[in-house]
Amino acid sequence: MPEATGKFTVSSWDEDTYAELDGGGKLTKAHVTFGFSGDLEAQGDWDALMIYGQDATAAFTGYQRTVGTLGGRSGSFVLRADGTFEAGVATTSWRVVDGSARGELRGLRGTGSAVAPGGPGGTFTFEYEIG
């Protein structure tokens, strides 16, 4: 299975709190735009729900529409992205939503991960196949 690696940056982040939790913490909705470079040259628009704990941790889930080029093929696909934020590091697991790929990426399947060790970006690894 091919593996794509590279870097990502956060282009924009718009987040709103929709509930404060007793004892601290909150629930939020966010829209984030990412730029990807490396084996995946793309832009990703991610809509997420997040829960922040009173201990400076968070958990999140959401869907990201990604448009660009992967393995020399252009198109778009949707990732489900689930993760956590602890000790200043955001760690995310990716899974391509079945049937979401379009263009030359139609039939794309794959999983991956992204790590942001503080700051507005990080690295990713993505194993995929196009069937």
Image (cartoon, grey):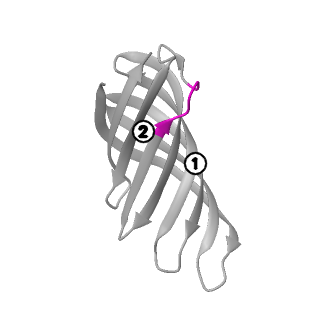
Whether the residues at callouts 2 and 1 have beta carbons within 8 Å, the answer is: no
- Using a 10 Å C-alpha cutoff, classify the residue at mark 1 as few (fewer than 14 neighbours), some (14 to 19) or many (20 or more): some
Considering the numbered disc 1 on the image, is that residue within a helix, a strand or a loop?
A: strand
Q: Residue at x 37, y 47 (%)?
A: 114
Whether residue 107 is situated above or below residue 67 in the rendered picture: above
Say whether residue 105 is magenta.
Answer: no
Q: Which mark is residue 35?
A: 2
Residue farthest to the bottom, as pictured = 23
Residue 51 x %, y %: 58, 66
Q: Which mark is residue 27?
A: none
The type of residue carrying mark 1 is Gly
In the picture provided, is 101 more to the left or to the right than 37? right
Whether residue 32 is situated above or below residue 27 in the rendered picture: above
* Front position among marks 2 and 1: 1
Say whether residue 97 is magenta.
Answer: yes
- Using a 10 Å C-alpha cutoff, classify the residue at mark 2 as few (fewer than 14 neighbours), some (14 to 19) or many (20 or more): some
Whether residue 15 is situated above or below residue 86 in the rendered picture: above
Q: Residue at x 31, y 41 (%)?
A: 7
Residue 2 x %, y %: 30, 25
Q: Residue at x 29, y 37 (%)?
A: 6
Residue 55 x %, y %: 47, 80
Which quadrant is the N terminus positioned in? Answer: top left
Q: What segment is highlighted magenta in the picture?
A: 95-100
The type of residue carrying mark 2 is Gly
Principal secondary structure, stretch drawn in magenta: loop
Q: Nearer the viewer, residue 38 or 27?
A: 27
Residue 71 x %, y %: 34, 20
Which quadrant is the C terminus positioned in? Answer: top left
Q: Which mark is residue 62?
A: 1
| Alpha-carbon span between mark 2 and mark 1 | 17 Å
